[in-house]
Structures are given as C-alpha cells and as structure tokens.
C-alpha cells in the first residue's frame, strides 16, 4: 500500500492517491495517528478533479479504498484551510464531509464533474509549472 520512510525517527507511509491530480500522494504516520492529505481530502471537501489530469473516478477510489480505511481517530491535516479549520479526523470527515456522504461511485463522479468551479488565479502559470515540478 506504499513505501514506508523514516525521517528523524518518525516512520510514515507514502500513499499514492490520484484523483485531484494524477500524481497525488498522502503521508500517513501510524504513530501518532496523523495523515497529511494535501488536496486529496480537505476538511468538509476534496480537491477538485477538473484540471491537471484529475479524475473523479480515481479520487473516489483513493478516498474509499485508502483514506477511509484508516482508523477513525486518525487526525487529518489537509493542504488547505478554507474555513478556519486546520485539522479533522477520518471519522469526522466520514460523517460530515458532503462529498464523502455520496457513497455511490456514480453519484460522486457526477457531482465532481458538475461543480462548475471558476479557474484558480494564475492557473495558466501554476499548472504548467506544477507539471514541470517548477523546473525551467
């Protein structure tokens, strides 16, 4: 389910979680029970899937086959804070995240494919830079 790395005495598992982008990863620290989810799982939301090789199908699988199988008390640290909340738990998200309440894959995909979100600021600059890892 992913490579296990150690950094300064902390072991963590690298979980490949495509969906928001085709190269998304989350980092799970079994002890003390944390996961850094980047844009895969946000607090009461998920990353969008409409650019940079995103896929609602892959995001659904990453969420339901990997992240939501973690212990319910795992603390979730997302890559963004949109509403003044900086952490949550897997259980809180299972019970309160509107996108995770769409338990049927087809419903989730339909919802994600019809969000009609505006483009992020500087998307024409940021996405090409992301795809090149910021390298010239």
Image (spheres, rainbow, N blue to C red):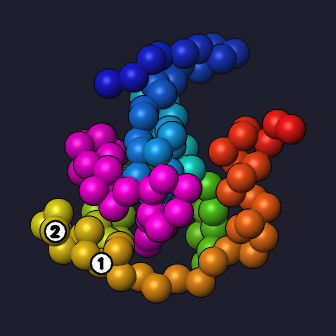
Determine whether, in the image, residue 81 is placed left or right of residue 4.
right
Count of numbered marks: 2
Question: Disc 1 on helix, strand or loop?
Answer: helix
Q: Which residue is mark 2?
A: 106
Inter-mark Cα distance, 2 to 1:
9 Å
Question: Picture quarter containing residue 119?
Answer: bottom right
Against 38, residue 43 (above or below) is below
| Residue 42 place in picture, x, y as percent | 49, 62
How many residues crowd mark 1 within 10 Å: few (<14), some (14–19), many (20+)?
some
The residue furthest right is 136
Q: Which residue is mark 1?
A: 111
Label located before the other in sequence (2 or 1): 2
Observer-nearest residue: 131 or 31?
131
Magenta span of residues: 42-70
Work out which quarter of the rendered image holds the C terminus and state it. top right
Against 71, residue 112 (above or below) is below
The image's mark for residue 9 is: none
Determine whether, in the image, residue 31 is placed left or right of residue 6.
left
Against 119, residue 61 (above or below) is above
Residue 59 part of the magenta segment: yes
Determine whether, in the image, residue 31 is placed left or right of residue 99.
right
> Would residue 16 be visible to someone looking at this image?
yes
Against 88, residue 67 (above or below) is above
Work out which quarter of the rendered image holds the N terminus and state it. top left
Observer-nearest residue: 34 or 81?
81
Question: Disc 2 on helix, strand or loop?
Answer: helix
Residue 18 part of the magenta segment: no
| Residue 79 place in picture, x, y as percent | 61, 55
| Residue 106 place in picture, x, y as percent | 16, 68
Question: Picture quarter containing residue 39?
Answer: bottom right
**Which residue is pictured at 42% across the width and 32% down the height?**
15
């Amino acid at each position: 389910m992913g490579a296990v790395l150690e950094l300064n005495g902390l072991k963590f598992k690298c979980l490949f979680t495509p969906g928001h982008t085709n190269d998304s990863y989350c980092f799970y620290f079994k002890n003390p029970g944390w996961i850094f989810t980047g844009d895969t799982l946000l607090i009461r939301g998920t990353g969008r899937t409409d650019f940079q090789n995103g896929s609602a199908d892959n995001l659904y699988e990453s969420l339901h086959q990997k992240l939501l199988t973690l212990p319910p008390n795992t603390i979730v640290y997302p890559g963004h804070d949109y509403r003044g909340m900086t952490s949550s738990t897997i259980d809180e998200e299972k019970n309160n995240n509107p996108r995770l309440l769409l338990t049927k894959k087809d419903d989730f995909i339909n919802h994600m494919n019809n969000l009609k979100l505006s483009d992020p600021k500087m998307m024409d600059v940021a996405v090409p830079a992301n795809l090149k890892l910021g390298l010239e």
